[in-house]
Amino acid sequence: MTSLAKVERVRPREASQVDDLVTVTVQTPTGAFAFPCENGEALLHAGLRSGVSLPYECATGTCGSCRGRLMTGEVDIGWEESPALAKLKREKGDILLCQTKAKSDCLVRVAAKIEQASLESAPRKLKGTIFDSRKLTHDVVEFSVKLSRPMTFEAGQFVLISTPSVTGARAYSMVNYDAETERIVFLVKRKSGGGFCDWLFSEMIDGAEIDVYGPLGRATFDTSEDKDLIIIAGGSGIAGMMAILERATRSNYFKSHLGHVFFGVPTLQDGFYLDELAKYVDKAQGGLNVTLALSNEPPPQACHPNYEGIQLASGFVHTAMASSMAGRYQNALGYLAGPPPMVDAALRVLISEGQLSPQAIRYDKFG
């Protein structure tokens, strides 16, 4: 075991909170970090709140990116049915940081390289109230949340939402973008057997109070990027991409760079946010192209019948992207969001055909 002589301690406890906190020490290839953890708080949340850049992707127990190994201490493993938990070597002490809660001081090994990040961008817990919910299609709902305090986030980030009505938290990307705002907008596609989806679609949710934790996610866009954008989204994966397009449009990014959006839906009738996408195309004045890919039916014509600026393509979204982008990947950043099979297929195209480096690709998978 590596020596713990050099342990970085962050955010000291307040005297009034001592009885409610335990200390978690995370041992990594870049050193050891110790931080306080509240009673009932996930290890991942406690570390991120203290500015420790613990690894994660979905933060909901699905992907397994936040894997660690408990060396000493007592913990509550959390969600026993977590899909990622089944992949771990639990007999050796493997845990998911996003689900596990410390019951005593503990030591955890994490294989990833960890850094001490700025506390200004650290995620936090907020209260929220749902309002302005509306169905965009038969199986897609949009809703806004009024936050108890303003939130600052980057375009492309997400938060965890939880409600007493449903067990567990769900990760959703912000559709809107503002430097600091008390209103955030989300998009949810109904999934068979999804508890949160069933709650959203079957209940009058306006006025419902929820818990919000964030912002989270590193698949973000900043106007300092000096590259063209390739945006690929399947279904509700368009949510975070709308925030990226909003920020890029406000900063006139497409006056000096090109943007290529590929949005996959089953049929023409399943398309949504087309008004907004068409407006982005108009404002870009030739700098932005949008293609709606239809996987379950052939397009009736080359362009959308109601939106001249939106092109139509047949097939899965990654095949539409590959066909359209042949020979045009130079100096580009790739942004992907959607179901894992879609993201994996698009990743293969960007890497094998586009020759994009891993550093030039940012993605979110929705399990």
Image: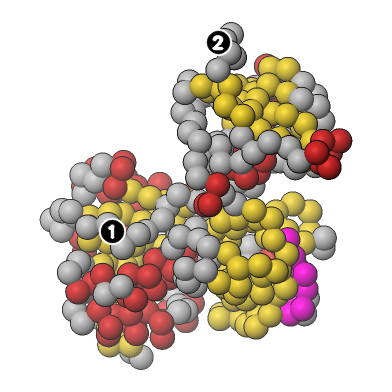
First-in-chain label (1 vs 2): 2
- Residue drawn at x 50%, y 36% is 116
- Residue 138 shows in the view: no
Q: How is the image coloured?
A: secondary structure
- Mark 1 lies on a secondary structure that is loop
Give neighbour class at mark 1: few <14, some 14-19, many 20+ (Cα, 10 Å): few
Residue 4 picture quarter? top right
Find the magenta span and give its range.
205-211
User: Residue 6, position in %: x, y?
Assistant: 55, 17
Left or right of residue 234, residue 183 in this image: right
The amino acid on which the numbered mark 2 sits, given as a three-letter code, is: Thr
- Residue drawn at x 61%, y 29% is 9
Measured along the vertical axis of the image, is residue 166 above or below residue 101? below
The amino acid on which the numbered mark 1 sits, given as a three-letter code, is: Ser
Residue 327 picture quarter? bottom left
- Viewer-proximal residue, 300 or 220? 220
Alpha carbon distance from label 1 to label 2: 39 Å
Measured along the vertical axis of the image, is residue 61 above or below residue 234? above
Q: Which residue is mark 2?
A: 2
Q: Which residue is mark 1?
A: 224
- Mark 2 lies on a secondary structure that is loop
Quadrant (top left, top right, bottom left, bottom right) of the N terminus:
top right
Left or right of residue 159, residue 246 in this image: left
Q: Is residue 209 magenta?
A: yes
- Residue drawn at x 77%, y 31% is 22
Residue 133 picture quarter? bottom right
User: Residue 225, position in %: x, y?
Assistant: 27, 57
User: Residue 339, position in %: x, y?
Assistant: 50, 55
Residue occupying the far bottom of the picture: 306
- Residue drawn at x 33%, y 70% is 248
